[in-house]
């Protein structure tokens, strides 16, 4: 496979199985047991599931940090198990992790963002262009000369995202990028995700926050190393019972909508955010 | 145990160009068996206050008294008083180090000079409290536990010191919704058995569901103090401090702005539903 093939699906996963290898006295731990997933180019997909359901393992399989035991993972046209194209693959599929402090390598913000393009051996003028573009996209251009340790958690995470954007990826995979942030940091990161979506970058967001998942085009629910069910946020969050079986909850607006229905108020299905519910209620009277 | 914080001030880098005042004249008290929450925007001084409360950094001015004993006196009584306050830091599972869960949980009691039998007894009791079966888990490595179990094992290590006041900094961060529910249940049951709890959280829904008293820190000062109802009815002021409301209260406040005000504050989805039903339901007028 090569990168030139046109693909409607930027990620194609077939029969993916992965177990963490045995360690000392510990046996192998199966993490993924038969995952099939297609992600349309330019879409925003949220992956949710309880701790240990395999969602982070799935993310790591998307840019060849982990290789399938069986099955296949093809991202941006590159098969992850093909060693020759792994760098090309990783340039196209960027990863952002949970802890902002573990992802910054330099003592100046713009140097950190330049790390990727420098390693690709790009021209200095091209590096400058990419770094400036990436920092502007995440709203950190003004702070480009700052030392990362003086930034807030949300700002650090924005710099980490800029470092990925400087490689001009087709797809960005974010593994619980907001878990360690305060509410305003979380808002900053979610705003950047909207920006990415608007630019046409495919976004895979792994999260425990149902409010964040409700903003995606599609929600994938994982449990026990498999995809339990999936659909639009409206479809997924209508299934309170199945979500609870998977150790999850519904966004507040969906919960309130259900309670209002029980009170005999006419509330249509498919409400997943507060704005929709407020609009509907205000239209009643 | 009654903990009184009196006129505490703390300044980082005092006398240096980067001098910053983290806390300024902070006073409040935590009653025996309390369930209090401490909220504040990042940089409001929460972490500094926590470190002062558990005896890690000495306040520049003011004092912290536990049942009248100053925590920062250089006496045996002060040391004993500090031991009655337990601290669960953020991501406490990062601090696990024992070869077995039992060894890890016993570390605290061992340092109190207790016998092996007593340590073991306390460890088993603490593991049961956090919902880990000691017969099954005590002998295995803490690193073979799942993420949520690891966190509970780390908390067991703090409980083995039998603290009378337990301070928890974002104990549910990074847990899945079910894990968050279990953490809430654990805090509630510890509190019901008499342990005072001070919860630090950014999650206003967690605070509203658990705390009886809320303390709001802003710019190093106590900005508000009261019940959840009192504090969360002041949404405008909280927003100016960079804080949000619990989801039900935020929803009702947005409805009020759109011309549908309601009396009082809603802290749960059910309370919000009841208020909305009065407005939009059959009894409320021309609903369906």
Image (spheres, coloured by chain):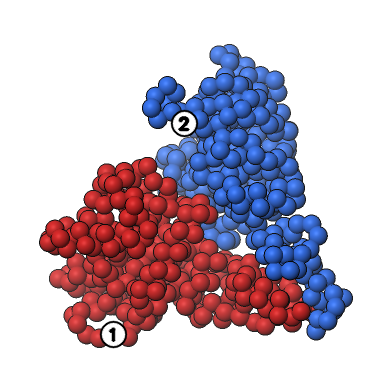
Chain colours: A red, B blue
Q: Residue at x 38, y 55 (%)?
A: A157
* Coordinates of residue B97 in the picture (x, y in percent): 42, 39
The 10 Å Cα crowd at callout 1, few under 14, some 14 to 19, many 20 or more, is some
Corner quadrant of residue B286: bottom right
Q: Is residue B20 above or below residue A60?
A: above
In the image, is A88 to the left or to the right of B93? left
In the image, is B275 to the left or to the right of A15? right
Q: Secondary structure at mark 2?
A: strand
- In the displayed orientation, state which residue is furthest to the top: B75
Can residue A10 be seen?
A: yes
Please give the residue where the numbered disc 2 appears in the rendered image: B20
Q: Residue at x 59, y 40 (%)?
A: B218
Q: Secondary structure at mark 1?
A: loop
Please give the residue where the numbered disc 1 appears in the rendered image: A7
The quadrant in which the N terminus of chain B is found is: top right
Q: Is residue B272 above or below residue B160?
A: below
The 10 Å Cα crowd at callout 2, few under 14, some 14 to 19, many 20 or more, is few
In the image, is A85 to the left or to the right of B14? left
Q: Is residue B280 above or below residue B244?
A: below
Closer to the observer: label 2 or label 1?
2
The quadrant in which the C terminus of chain B is found is: bottom right
């Amino acid at each position: 496979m090569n990168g030139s093939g046109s693909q409607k699906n930027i990620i194609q996963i077939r029969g993916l199985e992965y177990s963490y290898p045995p360690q000392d006295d510990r046996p192998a731990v199966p993490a993924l047991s038969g995952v099939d997933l297609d992600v349309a180019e330019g879409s925003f997909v949220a992956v949710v599931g309880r701790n240990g359901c395999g969602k982070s393992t799935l993310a790591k399989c998307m840019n060849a940090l982990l290789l399938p035991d069986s099955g296949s993972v093809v991202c941006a046209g590159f098969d992850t198990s093909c060693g020759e194209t792994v760098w090309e693959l990783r340039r196209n599929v960027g990863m952002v992790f949970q802890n902002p402090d573990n992802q910054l390598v330099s003592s100046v913000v713009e140097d950190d963002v330049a790390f990727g393009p420098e390693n690709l051996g790009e021209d200095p003028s091209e590096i400058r262009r990419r770094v400036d573009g990436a920092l502007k996209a995440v709203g950190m251009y003004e702070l480009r000369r700052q030392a990362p340790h003086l930034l807030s958690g949300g700002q650090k995470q924005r710099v980490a995202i800029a470092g990925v954007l400087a490689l001009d990826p087709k797809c960005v995979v974010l593994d619980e990028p907001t878990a360690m942030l305060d509410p305003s940091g979380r808002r900053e990161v979610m705003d950047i995700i909207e920006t990415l979506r608007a630019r046409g970058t495919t976004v895979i967001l792994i999260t425990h926050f149902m409010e964040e998942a409700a903003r995606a085009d599609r929600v994938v629910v994982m449990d026990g190393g498999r995809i339990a069910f999936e659909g639009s946020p409206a479809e997924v969050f209508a299934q309170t019972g199945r979500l609870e079986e998977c150790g999850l909850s519904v966004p507040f607006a969906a919960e309130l909508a259900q309670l209002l229905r029980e009170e005999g108020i006419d509330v249509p299905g498919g409400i997943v955010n507060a704005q929709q519910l407020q609009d509907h209620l205000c239209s009643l009277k | 145990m009654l903990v009184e914080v009196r006129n505490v001030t703390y300044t980082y880098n005092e006398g240096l160009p980067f001098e910053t005042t983290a806390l300024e004249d902070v006073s409040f008290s935590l009653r025996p068996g309390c369930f209090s929450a401490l909220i504040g925007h990042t940089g409001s001084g929460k972490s500094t206050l926590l470190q002062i409360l558990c005896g890690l950094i000495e306040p520049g001015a003011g004092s912290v008294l536990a049942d009248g004993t100053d925590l920062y006196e250089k006496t045996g009584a002060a040391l004993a008083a500090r031991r009655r306050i337990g601290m669960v830091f953020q991501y406490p599972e990062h601090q696990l180090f024992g070869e077995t869960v039992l060894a890890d949980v016993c570390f605290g009691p061992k340092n109190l000079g207790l016998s092996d039998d007593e340590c073991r007894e306390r460890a088993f009791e603490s593991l049961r409290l956090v919902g880990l079966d000691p017969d099954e888990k005590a002998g295995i490595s803490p690193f073979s536990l799942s993420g949520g179990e690891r966190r509970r094992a780390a908390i067991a290590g703090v409980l083995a010191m039998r603290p009378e006041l337990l301070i928890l900094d974002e104990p549910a961060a990074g847990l899945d919704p079910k894990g968050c529910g279990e953490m809430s249940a654990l805090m509630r049951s510890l509190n019901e058995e008499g342990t005072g709890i001070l919860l630090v959280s950014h999650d206003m829904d967690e605070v509203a569901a658990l705390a009886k008293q809320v303390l709001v820190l802003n710019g190093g000062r106590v900005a508000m103090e009261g019940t959840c109802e009192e504090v969360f009815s002041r949404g405008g002021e909280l927003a100016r401090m960079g804080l949000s409301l619990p989801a039900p209260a935020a929803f009702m406040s947005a409805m009020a702005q759109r011309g549908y005000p309601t009396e009082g504050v809603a802290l749960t989805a059910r309370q919000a539903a009841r208020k909305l039903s009065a407005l939009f339901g059959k009894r409320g007028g021309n609903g369906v």
